[in-house]
Image: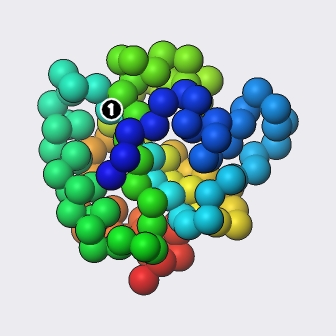
Amino acid sequence: MKNLTTQTFKEKIFNYEEENEWKFKGNKPTIIDFYADWCGPCKMVGPILEELSREYDNKVDIFKVDTETEHELAATLGIRSIPSILFIPLNDQPQMSMGAMTKEGFKDAINRILEVE
């Protein structure tokens, strides 16, 4: 699981300063966890995403964004509560989920939204 900054988000995911419509730059379905170190539910989600990053290695990219340091990105994407999880399929619009999820919930979303077995 890798950290994203505002700059790396624009390079790897979507450059919202240059594009008006969603245009995903990645080559794998992606999950982005918007979190803060002080957030209790975020601390529960982190280890689950670490496990999933190993289980879905080479199938799904999983990133995290610290909303405390990446204010511009969080504001631009309308992050109002954390954890917020952004699911980005390869050929469809991204979907945001708010609140902590179980491992089974993530696996269901990976299968249903990202279309990854």
Quarter in which the C terminus is drawn: bottom left
Drawn side of residue 65 relative to residue 112, left or right: left
- Residue 45 in percent (x, y) is at 23, 47
* Residue 7 sits in quarter: top right
* Residue 9 sits in quarter: top right
In this rendering, the count of numbered labels is 1
**85 and 14: which one is in front?**
14
Which residue extends farthest bottom? 117
Residue at horizontal 51 percent and vertical 25 percent from the top:
74
Residue at horizontal 82 percent and vertical 32 percent from the top:
18
- Residue 51 in percent (x, y) is at 21, 63
- Residue 87 in percent (x, y) is at 50, 54
Drawn side of residue 32 relative to residue 94, left or right: left
Q: How is the image coloured?
A: rainbow
Residue at mark 1: 35
Does 49 appear above or below 104?
A: above
Q: Does any portion of residue 62 appear in the rendered image?
A: yes
- Residue 38 in percent (x, y) is at 18, 22
**2 and 67: which one is in front?**
2
Q: Does any portion of residue 98 appear in the rendered image?
A: no
Residue at horizontal 62 percent and vertical 57 percent from the top:
26
Label 1, residues with CA under 10 Å away: few <14, some 14-19, many ≥20? many
Does 87 appear above or below 9?
A: below
SS category of the residue bearing label 1: strand
Does 43 appear above or below 114?
A: above
Circle 1: residue type: Tyr
Drawn side of residue 49 relative to residue 12, left or right: left
